[in-house]
Amino acid sequence: MILAATGSAVGLGAIWKFPYMAGANGGSAFIIPFILMVLFFGVTLILAEIIIGRAGRGSSVTSFRRIGGKFWAPLGFVGVLCAFLIMTYYSTVGGWCLTYLFEAIMGNAASSDLAMLEKTFLKTVSTPVSAILYQTLFLAITAGVLIFGVNKGIERISKVLMPLLFVLMIVLIIRGLTLPGAWEGLKFLFSPKWDQVTANSLLNAMGFTFFSLSVGMGIMVTYGSYISHKENLTTTALWVSVLAFISCILAGLMVIPPVIAFGLNPSAGPGLTFITMPAVFSHIPLGDVFAVCFYGCLLVAALTSMISLFEVPLAYLMDEFHFSRKTASVLLFIVLSICSIPSALSMGPWADYKIMDKNIFDAMDFLCCNILMPLSALFVVAMTGWFFFDRTKYEINSSVKHSDGFMKFFRFMLAFVAPCFIVVVAIFNLI
């Protein structure tokens, strides 16, 4: 469960977004508050979701209903809807990762011509047939894993993919740190730049903490429903949080030193992954081999996150409509393959179609990250911290008895501090 939940948190965003955000917001002056927020707010919110799942023994909707009654079920559905909508555009990015991995295997992913790399990336995201094809293949791989179930599917693949992800990261980190000029990359990432620490940078750290831990998507609720009462939930939540921020640090070490070493732009966002890094590989010996490692790493990160997202509506279909896992997986694959097409076309033929001045891809991302996720997280906090804290207390203490002091602190964090944290992040991102 720890590996699977960590895999849901360690997505593509962590690999390209964390290095840039750390560098742009004060280096370690950003990293230190980020770590503190993960350990306090992150553990609190993850633990709350796991508690609901284990107490309700079902999907997000089922667990909310079993704990709170029928009026709470629609609140649980917000997380299911959020996970589904995220998959409609996350699968598009997963398709890009597959495309670049195949190109890397063929020896075509590395080039020193940035203009050509940018042109290649724009062609990749805007060509309708290939975008839809690779997106559908990515969804098919995800569905194929989940058909095998929790133990033979999620658990088995997590035990392989998550260690593989860390191994690939470490290989790329070692190679990057041996490059001339890599020390400047470490300074960029870890040297405190206190003059850059502002209220805005701290809010950025809060926002990244919230969105990097996969809270508000129903993932931890769903995984929590598979945990036995012998497991220590507090330890589980702590492990997931710690591994998540370690993964972010590793992502920074993997990307920033080689980018800085070759004088490239570390603030290129998604372009850092698909434009800047290929230029890096063209400058180093065995660059094609390291390109395969890098895009293999990206694909693993995309798959582990997608598997976790897929399980949320999958569990909903099995619990609420009593479909078999195989039937639900195939049905969800077909529906997602259709519903994901607009995002795949949003940077090509449908680029001019706007929703609130955003293309379909960006509009879905805005809706999920800035509205549905915070709303779902508030419902989780309300259930566990305010209305059913006795059930929360029972679940936490079912395997290991916690002190009264710990329980008072946890409830204070859960019922008072966490809601403020969620609301501030939501307002900041909406504005």
Image (spheres, helix red, strand yellow):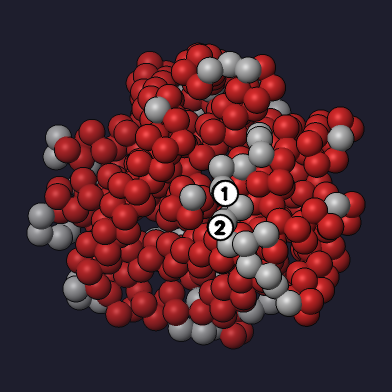
Above or below, 333 against 183 in this view is: above
Q: 50 or 121: which is nearer to us? A: 50
Residue 374 in view (yes/no): no
Instruction: Report helix, strand or loop for mark 1.
Output: loop
Image location of residue 191, percent across then percent down: 46, 83
Res 408 quadrant in image: bottom right
* Three-letter amino acid code at the position of disc 1: Ser
- Tag on residue 163? none
Q: Residue 131: x percent and y percent?
A: 40, 24
Report the number of discs. 2
Image location of residue 325, percent across then percent down = 50, 22
Could you tell me which residue is drawn at 54 percent across and 83 percent down? 193
* Residue 21 versus residue 357 in the image, above or below: below
Q: Which element type, helix, strand or loop, lies under badge 2? A: loop
- Residue at the (19%, 53%) spot, across then down: 290
Residue 40, percent from left and from top: 67, 71
For image coordinates 39% across by 61% down, the residue present is 251
Residue displayed at 60% across by 23% down: 318
Q: Residues within 10 Å of mark 1 (few under 14, many from 20)?
A: few
Decide: marks 2, 1 in contact (CB < 8 A)? Answer: yes
Report the residue marked by disc 1: 228
